[in-house]
Amino acid sequence: MILELRDARQSAPDRAWLRNVYPLYLHDLSEFDDGYYQLDERGLWQPDHMPSWLEDDQDLPLLVVVDDRRVGFALVARAPSPWIAPGCDHRMSEFFILRRERGAGIGARAAHAVFDAHPGRWEVSQLVRNERAIRFWRRVIGEQTGGRYEETADEEELRQIFRVKPSAGAARRAR
């Protein structure tokens, strides 16, 4: 299985795919988000953050491609984005793998590939009601860091902060 990360801004078909699939992610997220995203009278999710993902140079909209098939995305905010905790370089803002592709390790491989490609201090957060996401990110971040990460929580989110060193992926894969 060949996994590739592709910047969705580089081609019209990739941009269109991301725009079309993003509502599926929001639908899944709506179970946990306490109403931040709402369907408007036309059936469109609001607020619509997709334009900034596709236009802002601070943001990095990555498609997860496996064997030439688009299977998900990772939307990464980069400093000095206002959405990142002070002192962090990157934030995994949104992450989604199509349901039929889940459970095969694609999500973990994609997350590690994103982290490995962007060394620095990372922030990842999950909604406290999304237990599946919390288990996934604790496992993946634990693998990525050898268990060395900070975790904090408030009423809405659980948050991990950790550092990815250059070439950390090669060392981790060698284990």
Image (cartoon, rainbow, N blue to C red):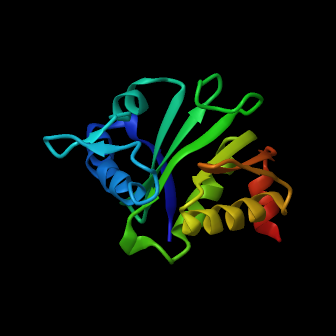
Q: Where is residue 141 in the image (x, y as percent from the top left)?
A: 72, 59
Q: Position of residue 25 (x, y in %)?
A: 38, 54
> What is the quadrant of residue 68 in the picture?
bottom left
State the residue in front, 116 or 77.
77
Vertical side of 134 occupied by 14: above or below? above
Q: Where is residue 73 in the image (x, y as percent from the top left)?
A: 44, 51
**Residue positioned most to the left:** 42
State the residue in front, 102 or 27.
27
Q: Which residue is depicted at the point 39% across and 40% down?
A: 8
Q: Which residue is depicted at the point 64% across and 32% down?
A: 84
State the residue in front, 1 or 26.
26
Left or right placement of residue 137 versus residue 119 in this view: left
State the residue in front, 140 or 127.
127
Q: Which residue is depicted at the point 74% across and 56% down?
A: 169
**Residue positioned most to the front:** 155
Q: Is residue 77 visible?
A: yes
Q: Position of residue 172 (x, y in %)?
A: 79, 63
Left or right placement of residue 95 versus residue 139 in this view: left
Q: In which quarter of the image is the C terminus?
A: bottom right
**Residue positioned most to the bottom:** 103
Vertical side of 42 occupied by 146: above or below? below
Left or right placement of residue 12 versus residue 115 in this view: left
Q: Which residue is depicted at the point 64% across and 22% down?
A: 80
